C-alpha cells in the first residue's frame, strides 16, 4: 500500500523520444525531444529539451544545416581548381569561359544551399534557380510568397533593343572597324557582349520569370543613372554579385570591421576574382583588375568621408562626374590589353564576329 502511494506521488519520468506521438498519452503533445545526434552539445540538448515543438525543430534544423555547410562550399573548393588544371590544354578564350562557369556554378550552388532549408519551396523552383536563372538572389527566387506584378511593356522594349544593339556591335560594327585597331575592335566587342548578355538576354529572362510571378530581380538596373559610386556598385551594377558579396562578406563583417572596411574588402575580393578570370587566361596583366577594384573602394571611401559629403560627391551632377572619373579613367586596368588581344579577339574570331 505504501509503495502504491509512493508511485502516485512520484510518477515515472516521461520517456525521451524523437516521436512523441508514438508513445501514448504519457507525453505532452506540444513537446518534442531531440535526438542525441541532432544537437552535438549536451548543454544545448538540456536547454532545448523542454521547449515547444516549433522552437526545438527550428533549432535542430539550424544545427543540421550548420553541420552540413561544407556541402555548400565544396564546389567552390573543387571546380575552379579543376578548371585551372586544364589551363595548358585549352585555348585562352575557352579556358576563360570554363573558369568563369566553374566559379559561377560554384557560387550558384552555394547560394541555393544556404537558402534551400530556410525557405519552403517546390522542387521546380530549385531546378529553375540553378539552371534557368543567372542571378544569385536565391531567397527571393525560391520564395513563392513573394509575388511581383507583371513587367511593364516598356521594360520588354528596352531589353529587346539592348539585345539587338549588343548583337549589332558584335557582328556588324566590330567588322567595320579598321583591322589595325585591334584594341578598339576588342573593346567594341566587349561592349557588345555586355549589352547582349547582361543588359539584354539576362533582362529578358528576368522579365519572363516576373511574368509568371517569380521574384527574379534584374541583373542590371540602369547603372548610368547612378549619381554616386555607392549607388552604382550597390544598387545598379551586377546585382547578382552584389547580393552574393553582401551575404557572404559584407553582412558578416560590417559590425566587426565597420561598413567602410567591410565594403573595401568586398572590392578586394571582387578584384581577385576578376584577376582570376581575366589575367590568368591572358597570362599577363596580373594585379591590374585588383587595383581597379581597390580604386573603386578608395573612391567610395572618399565619397563617404566628411570632405566628400561637404563637396557633394555622393549626389547630383558632381556625384555623377566623380563616379565616372573613377569608373572610366582606370578601366584599361580592368580589361587590359593582354586580355583584349589574347582572349577577346580570338573569341570573336571563334564566333565569326571578326
Image: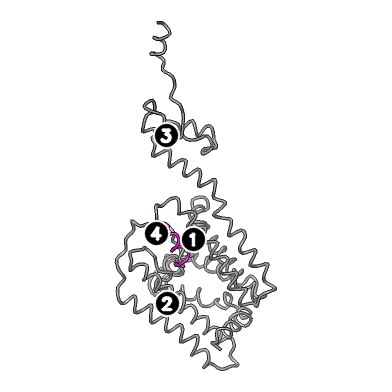
- Does label 3 or label 2 sit earlier along the sequence? 3
Mark 3 nearby-residue class (10 Å; few <14, some 14–19, many ≥20): many
* Residue 21 in which image quadrant: top left
Q: Magenta span covers which residues? A: 122-132
Tag 4's secondary structure? Answer: helix
- Does label 1 or label 3 sit earlier along the sequence? 3
Mark 1 nearby-residue class (10 Å; few <14, some 14–19, many ≥20): some
Total marks shown come to 4
Tag 1's secondary structure? Answer: helix
Q: Nearer the viewer, residue 100 or 14?
A: 14
Distance between the Cα atoms at labels 2 and 4? 21 Å
Q: Position of residue 352 (x, y in %)?
A: 55, 87
Distance between the Cα atoms at labels 3 and 4? 31 Å
Which residue sits at x=40%, y=10%? 4
For residue 291, side relative to residue 150 (left or right): right
Residue on which the image places disc 1:
244
Mark 4 nearby-residue class (10 Å; few <14, some 14–19, many ≥20): some
- Does label 1 or label 4 sit earlier along the sequence? 4
Number of the front mark, 1 or 4: 4
Q: Is residue 313 in sight in this rendering?
A: no
Residue on which the image places disc 4:
140
Identify the main secondary structure in magenta. helix
- Does label 2 or label 4 sit earlier along the sequence? 4
- Does label 3 or label 4 sit earlier along the sequence? 3
Distance between the Cα atoms at labels 2 and 1? 21 Å
Position of the C terminus, as image quadrant, is bottom right
Which residue sits at x=61%, y=81%? 337
Amino acid at each position: 500500500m505504501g509503495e502504491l502511494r509512493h508511485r502516485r506521488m512520484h510518477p515515472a519520468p516521461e520517456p525521451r523520444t524523437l516521436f512523441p506521438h508514438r508513445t501514448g498519452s504519457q507525453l505532452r503533445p506540444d513537446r518534442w525531444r531531440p535526438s542525441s545526434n541532432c544537437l552535438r552539445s549536451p548543454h544545448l540538448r538540456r536547454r532545448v529539451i523542454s521547449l515547444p515543438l516549433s522552437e526545438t525543430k527550428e533549432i535542430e534544423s539550424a544545427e543540421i544545416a550548420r553541420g552540413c555547410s561544407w556541402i555548400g562550399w565544396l564546389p567552390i573548393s573543387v571546380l575552379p581548381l579543376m578548371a585551372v588544371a586544364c589551363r595548358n590544354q585549352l585555348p585562352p578564350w575557352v579556358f576563360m569561359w570554363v573558369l568563369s562557369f566553374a566559379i559561377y556554378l560554384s557560387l550558384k550552388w552555394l547560394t541555393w544551399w544556404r537558402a534551400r532549408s530556410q525557405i519552403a519551396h517546390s522542387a521546380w523552383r530549385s531546378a529553375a534557380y540553378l539552371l534557368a536563372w543567372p542571378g544569385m538572389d536565391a531567397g527571393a527566387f525560391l520564395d513563392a510568397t513573394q509575388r511581383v506584378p507583371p513587367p511593364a511593356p516598356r521594360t520588354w522594349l528596352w531589353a529587346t533593343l539592348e539585345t539587338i544593339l549588343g548583337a549589332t556591335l558584335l557582328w556588324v560594327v566590330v567588322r567595320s572597324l579598321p583591322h589595325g585597331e585591334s584594341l578598339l575592335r576588342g573593346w567594341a566587342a566587349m561592349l557588345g557582349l555586355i549589352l547582349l548578355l547582361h543588359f539584354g538576354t539576362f533582362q529578358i529572362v528576368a522579365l519572363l520569370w516576373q511574368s509568371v510571378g517569380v521574384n527574379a530581380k534584374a541583373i542590371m538596373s540602369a547603372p548610368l543613372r547612378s549619381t554616386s559610386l555607392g549607388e552604382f556598385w550597390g544598387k545598379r551594377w551586377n546585382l547578382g554579385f552584389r547580393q552574393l558579396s553582401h551575404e557572404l562578406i559584407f553582412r558578416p563583417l560590417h559590425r566587426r570591421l565597420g561598413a567602410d572596411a567591410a565594403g573595401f574588402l568586398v572590392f578586394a575580393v571582387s578584384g581577385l576574382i576578376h584577376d582570376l578570370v581575366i589575367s590568368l587566361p591572358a597570362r599577363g596583366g596580373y594585379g591590374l583588375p585588383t587595383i581597379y577594384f581597390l580604386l573603386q573602394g578608395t573612391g567610395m571611401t572618399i565619397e563617404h568621408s566628411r570632405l566628400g559629403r561637404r563637396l557633394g560627391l555622393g549626389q547630383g551632377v558632381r556625384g555623377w562626374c566623380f563616379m565616372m572619373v573613377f569608373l572610366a579613367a582606370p578601366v584599361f586596368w580592368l580589361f587590359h590589353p593582354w586580355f583584349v588581344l589574347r582572349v577577346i579577339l580570338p573569341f570573336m574570331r571563334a564566333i565569326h564576329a571578326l
